[in-house]
Image (cartoon, rainbow, N blue to C red):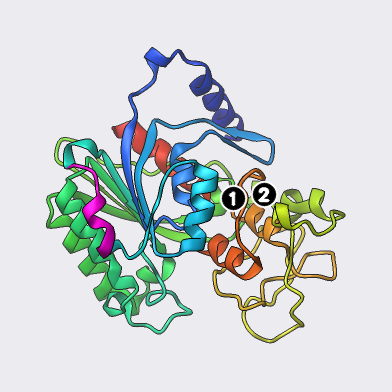
Amino acid sequence: MLQTVENDQKIADTRPTSAKQKKQKVVSMFSGCGGMDLGFMGGFEFLGKRYARNPFEITWANDLNPAACRTYKENLKHNIHVGSVWDVMGTLPQADDVDVVVGGFPCQDISVNGKGRGISGARSGLYRAMVDVVDSLKPKAFVAENVKGLLMKHNTTSLETVLRDFSALGYEVSFQLYHAAEYGVPQSRERVFIVGTAPGIPSFRPPTKTHEAKSWINSEMALSDLENMEENPEFSHIWSKAKRSPDQGDRRLKADRVGYTIRAECHGNIQWHYDLDRRISMREAARIQSFPDDFIFHSRLRETERQIGNAVPPILAWHMARALKEIL
């Protein structure tokens, strides 16, 4: 199956411009450091494989975190509006200049590690900003990402409310839980994607899985070439020196298994290397999240940890973009 993906990428990269689909213009909300947007744009390499450029162009992006915005701008090479989404809505493009809205609305109140407030919480309640933007811009489609906790029983009301609010705008709305490792990400990460399509647009079909469990990319495959590399802040190859702690996140990777979920708030307790007597570096965490090596995080360790943990794995986003491309 992986060979099929590679062949598709080569074909996509070599077709004449006239044969390619026109660019679909994308508004990106809660953009973070740019994992979702990089995946939608495509045109990057990871572990020696090329992920072709997609027909999506990010024309507007926003995030509250200045450090994440700095990383975003330096890597994706276009502007991003810094500040509360409510404060920057006046800068949104005109409705006739938007095809797709994407965003991973904050999940702290929904996460199993959160306080259980659901969408009533101040952070996760920001999904309403995305509803407002979709209502205002009326794109052909939207893609919203969130944690697996949204599907848990105690969040049933939250999920039903989110789906109802988007459906009330006239969109055909579907949702599905995706395991990142099944799409070539070396990480045990499960996330919910909610996709809506406007009337006249075909129903969304989830991307085909590329990796069965026996072929998942394990930690050693993803990280082995970094084992003997000295710390290098410019490459984000730096790691926490925090001592061992019983707090969550303090686990050792297993060389023959995919990495554990990279969290945004490990407070120094990010997991340990499978073989070395140290925690994994930020570059290794970025690898586990499927960021290419030329994606540089312009922050210190703790802030970089937060950016990587909050991100949508670019490769998973790439596959979502490819599936969306087929119906647009």
Where is residue 250 shown, x and y percent of the image?
69, 77
Decide if residue 15 is on the left or right side of residue 303: left
SS label for mark 2: loop
Where is residue 31 shown, x and y percent of the image?
41, 55
Residues tagged 2 and 1 counted as in contact (Cβ below 8 A): yes
- Please identify the quadrant where the C terminus is shown: top left
Q: Earlier in the sequence, mark 2 or mark 1?
A: 1
Q: Is any atom of residue 282 visible in this view?
A: yes
Q: Which residue is mark 1?
A: 185
User: Where are the magenta residues, as a range?
Assistant: 86-94
**Disc number for residue 217:** 2
Q: Main secondary structure of the magenta part?
A: helix
- Residue in the image at 60% along x and 63% along y: 304
- Residue in the image at 41% along x and 46% along y: 79
SS label for mark 1: loop
Figure quadrant of residue 327: top left
Where is residue 57 shown, x and y percent of the image?
38, 36
Structural crowding at the residue carrying mark 2, measured as other residues with C-alpha within 10 Å and reported as few (<14), some (14–19) or many (≥20)? many
- Residue in the image at 13% along x and 54% along y: 169
Q: Amino acid at mark 1?
A: Val
- Residue in the image at 77% along x and 75% along y: 241
Q: Amino acid at mark 2?
A: Ile
Distance CA(mark 2)–CA(mark 1): 7 Å
How many circles with numbers are drawn on the protein? 2
Where is residue 311 shown, x and y percent of the image?
50, 58
